[in-house]
Structure formats: C-alpha cells, structure tokens
Image (cartoon, helix red, strand yellow):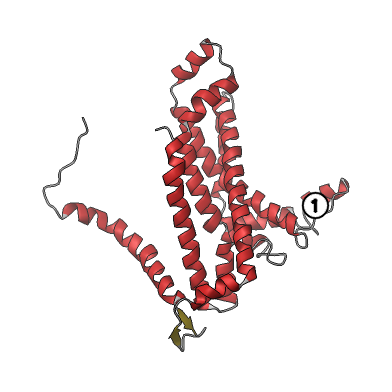
Amino acid sequence: MEKRVVFKSRWLPWLLLFPQLAVIGIFFFWPAAQAIRQSLRAEDPFGMSSQFVGWANFLQLWADENYVACFRTTAEFSLLVALLGIGLALVLAVFADRIIKGATVYKTLLILPYAIAPVLAGVLWAFMFSPSIGNIPWLLGKMHVTWDYLVNAGQAKWLIVMAAVWKQISYNFLFFLAGLQAIPKSLIEAAAIDGAGPLRRFWTIQFPLLSPTTFYLLVMNMVYAFFDTFALIDATTQGGPGQSTTILVYKVYLDGFKNLNLGGSAAQSVVLMSIVVVLTVLQFRFVEKKVQY
C-alpha cells in the first residue's frame, strides 16, 4: 500500500516548492516570455527604438533559404548524435558490466569526457584535426587521405558529430551501466542455464528491461544536440565552412549577436523552443508506448 505524506499546513508544500519554482520562473518562463515579446517587434540594435511588427519576423525566416537549410543540418546532426551516442554507450556499458579485473579503471576512463567543458572539448578536437598541426590529418596524409575540415563541408559535419558524441557518451554510459547493474542476476543466470547465448540474453532480457533508460536518454540526447552543442561548434567550425555546420541554436547566435537582428533572432529562438517541445511531446506520446516499466 502506498504511503502518502500529509502536511499539517496547506502552505508548507508550496513553501518547500518555492525555491525550485522560482528558479524555473526566473530562468525559463521569464526569458521565454521576453523572447516571444521580442519576436513580435523590430528593435534597434542599440535599444533606442522598438516597433510592433506582428508576425513579420517569422515570415522573413521562411523566406530565408539559409535558415531553411539549417533545419536539414540540425535534423541530420541531432539524429546522428543521438543514435551514435546511445548506441556506442550501450555497447561500452555491456562490456563494462562484464569486466571483472580493472573495472574501476575502465569505467573511470569512460567517464572522464563528461568532466570536460564543451568549449574545451571543441578546442581539443579542433587541435587534433587541425589541417596544419593536427596529428590525425598527419596520419591520414600518410594513407593518402586529404583532411581539411576548414574547406570540406562533409568533413566538418563529421567532425562536430564525432566531438558531440564523444562529449555525451559518458553521460549515456553512466545510465546504461546503472540500468544493467540493476537487472537481477538471477534472470541472466536462468537464461544461461536454459541455453541462451550472450547475444540472445541481451536482446530478450537486458535490452527490453533497459527501455525506460533508453527512452530517457533519447529525449536528453535530442535536447543536448539542439542546445548544448553550441559551444562545441563555436570552438571548432564556427558554423562553417559556409553554413554547412550551422544548426538552429548557432543561427540564433549569428543573427542576434553578430548581425544584430534582434527581432529575427528572437523569432528563431521561439521556433527552436517550439520544435524541442513538440519533439519531446511526440516522443512521450508515441515512443513511450514501447517502453516496458
């Protein structure tokens, strides 16, 4: 029987929730309201004048071919980061769960990338793959492979995907490893006694029981790819070459802080926020049905 906590005062629960509600209100709802307000106005970059223009900023976005191209870049980037990050982390977690000797060292090394700030991760990968001083291009040159992500759009895209996956893989690994260790060993041993091999035990027992963890990581990795990769892109490609690696969140920065188009940038932020909210709702509406709790 579920045990519920009963407060003597009707105001005590709200008092306990107030710090968290204040943080959400100040750092989410207030900026979101300001962005919506600013997206409906045309403002002077120096804040000297402001004029209500309605939906004009949003209409200009769809007329901008570069902005529409950012949608495709963002979709490809987010899908690759989410799928590769989750898939590789799951494989690493399965192997880590089987290791007996040296498991602590192995797990520690896999967790280290999560402690590195995104901008430092971007600088690290930019140095490793630098066409002039990087070790990786030098090794590729020995194999007669030309690497220059500064001029090759395809190589630039794969560079930021690899860097983003490397940065996020520790986060995914921790959750998968915890999920695997929470599965009762008796289930695995019973399946082994019945003659099920390691691969069959994984697909029929472990992976279905990991579905809540996988669903959670799918949502978090999509949000990560949309927002938290800004610093990484800024430190490596700065959206180039051209705009081949400019995702939606970086486009907001370019138009707002470099081109000083405050109204258009605010409109882009509102569109980006709406996309993430819709994707999250769809994931909870359709993907969660396949989750086994």
Q: Position of residue 3 (x, y in %)?
A: 20, 35
Q: Position of residue 161 (x, y in %)?
A: 65, 51
**Numbered disc 1: secondary structure:** helix
In the image, 200 versus 123, the foreground residue is: 200
Give left or right: position of 225 versus 138: left
Q: Which quadrant of the figure contains the N terminus?
A: top left
Q: What's under tag 1, amino acid-wise?
A: Pro
Above or below residue 1? Residue 53 is below
Q: What residue appears at the point 50 percent right and 62 percent down from the top-left corner?
A: 272
Q: What residue appears at the point 59 percent right and 67 percent down from the top-left corner?
A: 251
- The quarter holding residue 23 reads bottom left
Q: Which quadrant of the figure contains the C terminus?
A: top left
Mark 1: give few (<14), some (14-19) or many (20+) Cα within 10 Å.
many
- The quarter holding residue 118 reads bottom right
Please name the residue that numbered disc 1 is placed on. 137
Above or below residue 62? Residue 141 is above
In the image, 157 versus 67, the foreground residue is: 67
Q: What residue appears at the point 58 percent right and 65 percent down from the top-left corner?
A: 250
Q: What residue appears at the point 59 percent right and 61 percent down from the top-left corner?
A: 71
Q: Position of residue 252 (x, y in %)?
A: 55, 69
* Name of the residue lying farthest toward the left: 8
In the image, 46 versus 194, the foreground residue is: 194
